[in-house]
Image (tube, helix red, strand yellow):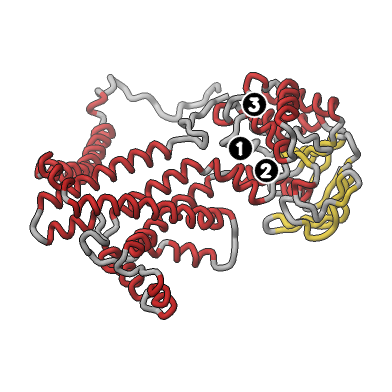
């Protein structure tokens, strides 16, 4: 436009080199501070794992795996975690779907209630289960089907915590599936149940696998509620965290570290699975975006 | 024919009250109006996805007000297509037919025919995640048309498409109408699209329908 003045005039003389521009230096200091602060935690994490690894030897690991008590604990952990995962999905799928799709009175209250196992101290969950099983109806049940201080109590204690994580994951999963898909399915001739089975559940597959893995990993690490509700009886209610506790309490640090490494390896595998399944589409392929 | 008799539906914080409308068989009607005027709500009321508080909805001379969405005989194409993430294009085209108990041979014949019309034949074994915007909308159209409904309701089906794809989709919609004689109700914000496709343009203003 004729006669219009430029808003900013270019500086006279040569431009300063990029490294000397004050904002670039400030950015570098800011980034350095971020790396330093975050790096401390990462270094601590790696050092912790490395210390465990260097403390033990393959001989310790082999010896630990040869112990009948530890083998029993591995078997019970695998069995109880798998059952806990299946039970958690059985409950978390309907709760997650209901919470993601429906408005009803008391929904916020229920939402807060479902988070209780996540925020409650683990020992308190164990204690609460123990007290619950002292009530007359459940004492009557125990006469026919023993739960407290028996294997079912291990599964129930793991389930109470692991299920809360599965519910949280699946609620987010279902909320992310466009409800229009179900509506279209209804116009095509589905009833609500058919729309759920044919459209929603297949679309939720990666989320269901993630929830299952999280529940499994969470159940594997559960200790507090099991200690209170199931006790720590060798060859009876002993799961891997109980083994670590029992070996430590008798001063066998090598065995405790060997079992800890076993649990650490399981946790790493679970993490890798969660990340892999989290990035998959509902038909088992990596999600990609096509433009055009 | 679509007929609305004194229909009242709730739209967010307000009501669309006593809407009456007659859409003749085989015609293409465009419904326009500002964002939030209740166009989609009215369409959902017709399709059975939102409760009609009073009045009645008639499709082809049949009162469908109390019927579930799947028994109204309406094909519905939402704005973003809302394709089913876990199904291939072929499975989309056969979805409604499988629900109706069609044999595999009949389903294959029908999905092949639809894919031919809509230019989807090379895409039949693809997943929604790999489709472009225009391809997605053609799949959504095919899925809605597969069970040969007498009425097709479209909610801004062309709004997210580029000009060239939009032109192609306009041609597809015209061809569908001439081939099937279906009754179309089509929500759009684009006047030139409405003028190009529709026999009649209705405006929804402050809860009232105006021609």
The residue that appears at 65% across and 36% down in the rendered structure is B81
Residue tagged 2: A185
Report how far apart the C-alphas of labels 1 and 3 lie in the structure.
14 Å
Would you say A174 lies left or right of A136 here? right
In the foreground, A56 or B28: A56
Residue tagged 1: B84
The residue that appears at 60% across and 25% down in the rendered structure is B125
Are there few (<14), some (14-19), or many (20+) residues within 10 Å of tag 2? many
Residue B43 visible in image: no
Q: Chain of mark 1?
A: B
Q: Can you tell which quarter of the image residue A291 is in?
A: top right
Choose mark 1 or mark 3, whichever is in front: 1
Above-or-below relation of B42 to A145: above
Q: Chain of mark 3?
A: B
Report how far apart the C-alphas of labels 3 and 2 lie in the structure.
19 Å
User: Along the polypeptide, which appears first: circle 1 or circle 3?
Assistant: 1
**Which element is circle 2 on?**
helix
Above-or-below relation of A139 to A71: below
Report how far apart the C-alphas of labels 1 and 2 lie in the structure.
9 Å
- Pick the quarter of the image with the N terminus of chain A: top right
In the foreground, A88 or B31: A88
In the foreground, A105 or A274: A274
In the rendered image, the residue lying farthest to the bottom is A136
Same chain assignment for discs 3 and 2? no
Residue tagged 3: B135
- Pick the quarter of the image with the C terminus of chain A: top right
């Amino acid at each position: 436009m004729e006669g219009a003045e430029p808003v900013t005039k270019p500086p006279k003389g040569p431009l300063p080199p990029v490294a000397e521009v004050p904002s670039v230096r400030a950015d570098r200091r800011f980034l350095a501070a971020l790396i330093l602060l975050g790096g401390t935690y990462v270094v601590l994490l790696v050092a912790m794992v490395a210390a465990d690894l260097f403390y033990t030897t393959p001989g310790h690991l082999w010896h630990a795996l040869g112990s009948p008590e530890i083998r029993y604990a591995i078997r019970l952990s695998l069995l109880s975690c798998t059952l806990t995962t299946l039970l958690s999905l059985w409950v978390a799928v309907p709760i997650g779907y209901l919470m993601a799709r429906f408005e009803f009175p008391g929904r916020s209250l229920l939402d807060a209630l479902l988070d209780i196992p996540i925020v409650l101290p683990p020992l308190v969950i164990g204690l609460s289960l123990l007290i619950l099983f002292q009530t007359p109806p459940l004492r009557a049940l125990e006469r026919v089907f023993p739960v407290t201080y028996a294997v079912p109590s291990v599964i129930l204690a793991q389930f109470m915590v692991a299920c809360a994580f599965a519910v949280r994951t699946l609620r987010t999963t279902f909320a992310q599936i466009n409800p229009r898909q179900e509506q279209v399915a209804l116009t095509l001739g589905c009833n609500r149940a058919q729309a759920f089975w044919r459209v929603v559940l297949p679309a939720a597959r990666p989320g269901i696998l993630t929830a299952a893995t999280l529940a499994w990993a969470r159940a594997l690490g559960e200790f507090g509620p099991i200690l209170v509700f199931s006790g720590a009886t060798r060859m009876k209610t002993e799961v891997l965290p109980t083994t670590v506790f029992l070996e430590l309490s008798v001063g066998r640090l090598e065995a405790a570290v060997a079992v800890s490494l076993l649990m650490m390896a399981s946790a790493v595998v679970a993490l890798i699975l969660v990340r892999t399944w989290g990035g998959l589409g509902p038909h088992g392929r990596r999600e990609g975006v096509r433009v055009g | 024919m679509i007929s609305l008799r004194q229909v009242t539906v709730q739209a967010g914080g307000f009501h669309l009250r006593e809407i009456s409308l007659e859409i003749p068989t085989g015609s293409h009607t465009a419904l326009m109006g500002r964002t939030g005027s209740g166009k989609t709500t009215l369409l959902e009321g017709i399709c059975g996805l939102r409760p009609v508080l009073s009045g009645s909805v008639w499709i082809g001379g049949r009162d469908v007000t109390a019927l579930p969405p799947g028994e109204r005989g309406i094909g519905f194409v939402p704005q973003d297509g809302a394709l089913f993430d876990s199904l291939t294009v072929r499975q989309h085209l056969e979805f409604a037919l499988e629900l109706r108990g069609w044999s595999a041979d009949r389903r294959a014949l029908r999905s092949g025919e639809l894919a031919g019309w809509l230019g989807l034949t090379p895409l039949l074994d693809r997943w929604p995640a790999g489709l472009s915007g225009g391809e997605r909308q053609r799949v959504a159209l095919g899925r809605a048309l597969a069970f040969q409904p007498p009425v097709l309701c479209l909610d801004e089906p062309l709004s997210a498409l580029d000009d060239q794809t939009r032109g192609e989709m306009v041609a597809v919609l015209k061809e569908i109408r001439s081939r099937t004689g279906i009754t179309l109700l089509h929500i759009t914000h684009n006047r030139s699209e409405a003028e190009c496709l529709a026999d009649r343009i209705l405006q929804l203003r402050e809860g009232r329908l105006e021609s």
